[in-house]
Image (spheres, helix red, strand yellow):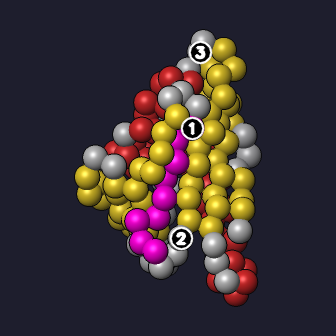
Amino acid sequence: MNLESPKVTVAKSAQHIFDALSDVKNFEKLMPENIAKFEVLGDDIFNFGLKGMPEIKLRMKDKTPHSKVVLAAASDKIPFTLTANIDSVSDAQSAVQLHFEGDFNPMMAMMIKGPISKFIETLAENMNKL
């Protein structure tokens, strides 16, 4: 299952967005209002829970300076990645788009497609909070 957020333009440089997303603590600023839990477990891993959904652990998987940050599920039960692609528009502006890629059975994919789409849209919309 592949999902994409809308591309958002942020009044920050690509380097600023990359540096902010490289620090897992900053993901709390991006979370939706219905967050029930957010906990940093280490330099490259955090745990979060939204009301009515199971908690998810995300680990920093890969980084390409100033253009890409990849997070992956820390559990093999629900394998997925969340990639932030960062494009520099100017020295003070960048465009960010989130890509969610997961390997789910058709029933699971049908159940989570809506909530996951809304979730990554909210993360993208909140990029200006970084």
Within the magenta stretch, is there residue 103? no
What amino acid type should be assigned to the residue bearing mark 3? Answer: Ala
Within the magenta stretch, is there residue 72? yes
Which residue corresponds to the image point at 40% horizontal and 56% vertical from the top-left? Answer: 59
Cα separation, mark 2 vs mark 1, equals 19 Å
- 76 or 27: which is nearer to us? 76
Say what secondary structure mark 2 lies in: loop
Which residue corresponds to the image point at 50% horizontal and 23% vertical from the top-left? Answer: 15
Q: Which residue is mark 2?
A: 79
Q: Earlier in the sequence, mark 2 or mark 3?
A: 2
Say what secondary structure mark 3 lies in: loop
Which numbered disc, 3 or 1, marks the residue closer to the eye?
1
Q: Is residue 78 above or below residue 37?
A: below
- 25 or 118: which is nearer to us? 25
Report the span colored magenta: 68-76
Q: Which residue is mark 1?
A: 68
Say what secondary structure mark 1 lies in: strand
Q: Position of residue 10 (x, y in %)?
A: 62, 29
What amino acid type should be assigned to the residue bearing mark 2? Answer: Pro
Q: Which residue is mark 3?
A: 92
Cα separation, mark 2 vs mark 3, equals 35 Å
Q: Is disc 2 surrounded by few (<14), some (14 to 19) or many (20+) residues within 10 Å? A: few
Q: Position of residue 67 (x, y in %)?
A: 58, 31
Q: Earlier in the sequence, mark 3 or mark 1?
A: 1
The answer to whether residue 30 shows anywhere in this view is: no
Q: Is residue 11 above or below residue 103?
A: above
Give left or right: position of 23 versus 62.
Answer: left
What amino acid type should be assigned to the residue bearing mark 1? Answer: Lys
